[in-house]
Amino acid sequence: MKKPVYLDYNATTPIDPEVAGEMIPYIRERYGNPSSSYSIGRRNKEAVDLARNQVAALINARPDEIIFTSGGTESNNHAIRGSAMANRDKGKHIITSSTEHPAVTEVCRYLASLGWEITWIPVDAYGKVDPVDVEDAIQPDTVLITIMHANNEVGTIQPIREIAAISRKHDIVFHTDAAQSVGKIETDVAALGVDLLSIAGHKLYAPKGIGALYVKRGIPIEKLMYGAGQEMGWRPGTENVIHIAGLGKACEIAKRDFHKNVETMFAVRERLWKSLKNKLGGRVHLNTGTAGKLPNTLSVSFKGIEAHALVASLGEEVCISAGSACHADSVKISSVLKAMNMDPAAARGTVRISTGKFSTPEEVDHALDIIINTVTKLS
């Protein structure tokens, strides 16, 4: 079967061959426990330390500010729950946005069930948070602000520096979910001014099941679980050396090839949009523009077409995501598109096309032919 054209890099990325190569020795022969004192254990401890330095270098952090986790969801849970619990004597109010990933919204809803008050900041038609709204929502008992760096569905980049400055002014801990932004846009924790930042390895050409949490020195968080002293006591359990080594290598590559990768993602995304617009005209609409967006993300709606029907019709030829889900006799529009107050008909026809560093003009052109022909048949 012919390989499909993969244009859903925001969902997950393939493992970079260099990353796979870095992992193989730890699968085949380097099996030692990093906590062991003999040589095969010490070598794996050195591998974990190297990876911690590689992750830290990508986001301009100190190595001892990096905690390895099982992925973005765990990182978000640890950041939000850990910070809320550590600061519960100061207050129980959290500020977040209406377009966060479920790994943030569900944690906030859980805390709400325990007595925390959650303020959900609205977004504009482009999915952007207004820092003024954030500052207006601050209460005397606000202990945490959590706003994602870039949206996974529409690619909107949030004004993190401005929100972080507001957080510092009011002495409030600030967390950002950077799962979609690391490796695509500059993600410098010092420049952003954040206290906590989440990374997901499988969005970064590393394997699934690995991630990291940046915790700025001096920021108190409670442990998510309890055990031995691994990860400086913050995240106990024998380290997943295979995946940690992979994440470290992925971060090294992301830093090394950053400008080349961004140029590739941007160029093929623009090629996609211009061709769709030229061939389909008024039948295709760009939902959020391209300014202030991730360089790889395209959110478009097709007039008169249900997105899930389009995705299903593309079958195994082109992989993209729908902005709505089909359930029996109804179509459920995503919470992000709802928060943007998008016209329901447009929302039902919305798809996300996301390019990656392995995307090529040739495969994009092939995908365009298939998408355009399918849209024409469904119209």
Image (cartoon, helix red, strand yellow):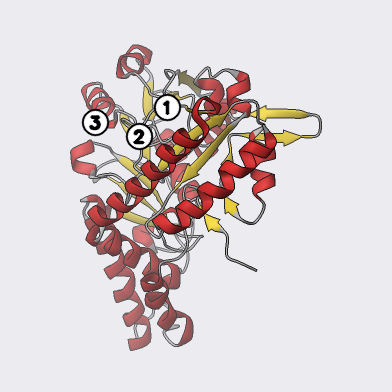
Camera-nearest label, 1 or 3: 1
Work out whether 35 lies above or below 329.
below
Query: Are the residues tagged 2 and 3 within 8 Å (C-beta)?
Result: no
Question: Which residue has dot 3 on it?
Answer: 161
SS for callout 2:
loop
Tell me which numbered mark, 2 or 3, is placed earlier along the sequence: 3
In the picture of the structure, the residue carrying the numbered disc 2 is: 293
Query: Going 32% across and 53% down the picture, which residue do you hit?
Result: 264
User: How much space separates mark 1 and mark 3, taking CA atoms?
Assistant: 21 Å
Q: Is residue 111 visible?
A: no
Say what secondary structure mark 1 lies in: loop
- Which x, y percent locates residue 188? 22, 45
Q: Nearer the viewer, residue 166 or 250?
A: 250
Amino acid on which the number 2 mark rests in the picture? Lys
Is 9 situated above or below 83?
below
Tell me the residue that label 1 is attached to.
288
Q: Is 100 or 344 nearer to us in this picture?
A: 344
Residue 278 in sight in this render:
yes
Mark 3: amino acid: Arg
